[in-house]
Every structure is written in C-alpha cells, then in structure tokens.
Image (cartoon, rainbow, N blue to C red):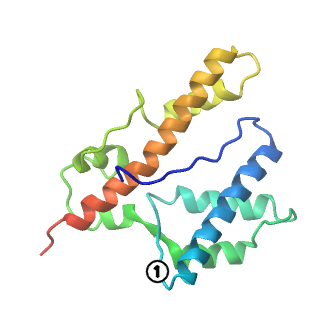
Amino acid sequence: WRSAEIFSIFDFANTDEAEYKVLTQMWNKLEDLVSQAKSENKTIGIFHYSHHEKTWWRRFAKRFINQPQVPTLDHVENFMNRYFVDLLEYSRRVSLPTTGYSIKLLAPHAHFNWSVDNAGGATSLLKYKEATSTSTSDAKRQEAIDWLISYNRDDVRATYAVREYLRKLKLP
C-alpha cells in the first residue's frame, strides 16, 4: 500500500453528466482490470471497506440504465459477487484493538494515517460542497478539490493497509 499505483477519476462539475462520466470510467477500469487478470491467468479481488461501494454501483446501474456503457443491474450484481471483497466483513470476524470497526479506527493499527486534516465523511461532504460551489473562490475551490483527491487516495491506501494488517493477524 505504500507504493501502490493509485489513479484518480474525478469531475467536480456537480451534474448528472459528470457523475455518469466518472462512474462509467470507473466501471470500465474495473472491468479492464478483471479482463487483464483473466488474460494473465490470475485471480483478482476488488477490495473495499463496507457496503457503500456496492450501493454506489447499484445506483449507477439503476440511475443511468438507458445510457451507453452502463451495465445492467444483474451484471453489476454478478460482477460484485464474483470480484468484490468487503474487508469490513472480515474485520468483524475478529476482536480488534479498537472501539469500533470503522476503517478510520482500524487503519492506524495498520500504521496508516491520512495525509489530510479531519479525514472523514462529514468533512468530505463539506469539501465537496466547496469544490462544486459557484460562489467559492477559485483558490478555495482548488484547495477543496486537492483535499478531496488526497482524502480519496488515502482511503484506497487505508484499505490496502487494513487488508495487509488483517492478513498478518495470527488467528487460532
């Protein structure tokens, strides 16, 4: 997770078209990664933490059902069932030295810390509003965009770190 190549796909236009564009690009990237692994005779798992990622993909399939390149809901469900791995489910199977199972609580035990101040969902919503607001100054808008990109990249790294942490646990 310290050296993984992490890419970003974003559009802060705050329109249906921008959301469609970003989600389509992300879905195509996932499909490409699976195809590449299969062509190399490798297995692949798409790791995430909690049900939210699956919820987004279901909404994408339903919301943009008639748009080009949008998979059917059945295809999304089959793809997720086959390749998605929810680390939260694995975390809940063991007793961890945290007060809960949030990735924000668990990641520091994996020696991971977010690079942004006040990392969390509530702050990310406020930053998104700043990034998409037409009344925000260009400098404040760019600051919010930079924060969001760093925060989201760190969420991916945190997922890697937690996966590594869980794999190293010595279980009876």
Q: Is residue 91 left or right of residue 169?
A: right
Q: Residue at x 67, y 63 (%)?
A: 27
Dividing the picture into quadrants, the one containing residue 67 is bottom right
Q: Is residue 121 visible?
A: no
Q: Is residue 49 visible?
A: yes
| In the image, residue 136 above or below residue 19 | above
Q: Is residue 166 left or right of residue 60?
A: left
Where residue 1 appears, as percent x and y from the top left, is 36, 53
Residue holding disc 1: 43
Dividing the picture into quadrants, the one containing residue 26 is bottom right
Nearer-the-camera pick, 41 or 129: 41
Where residue 64 appears, as percent x and y from the top left, is 81, 59
Q: Is residue 52 left or right of residue 164?
A: right
Q: In which quadrant is the C terminus drawn?
A: bottom left
| In the image, residue 74 above or below residue 26 | below
Where residue 84 appears, as percent x and y from the top left, is 50, 70
Q: Residue at x 70, y 57 (%)?
A: 25
Q: Is residue 88 left or right of residue 45?
A: left
Where residue 164 appears, as percent x and y from the top left, is 29, 61
| In the image, residue 157 above or below residue 35 | above
Which amino acid lies under the numbered mark 1 shown in the image of this protein? Thr
Residue ranking furthest to the bottom: 41
Q: Residue at x 66, y 43 (%)?
A: 10
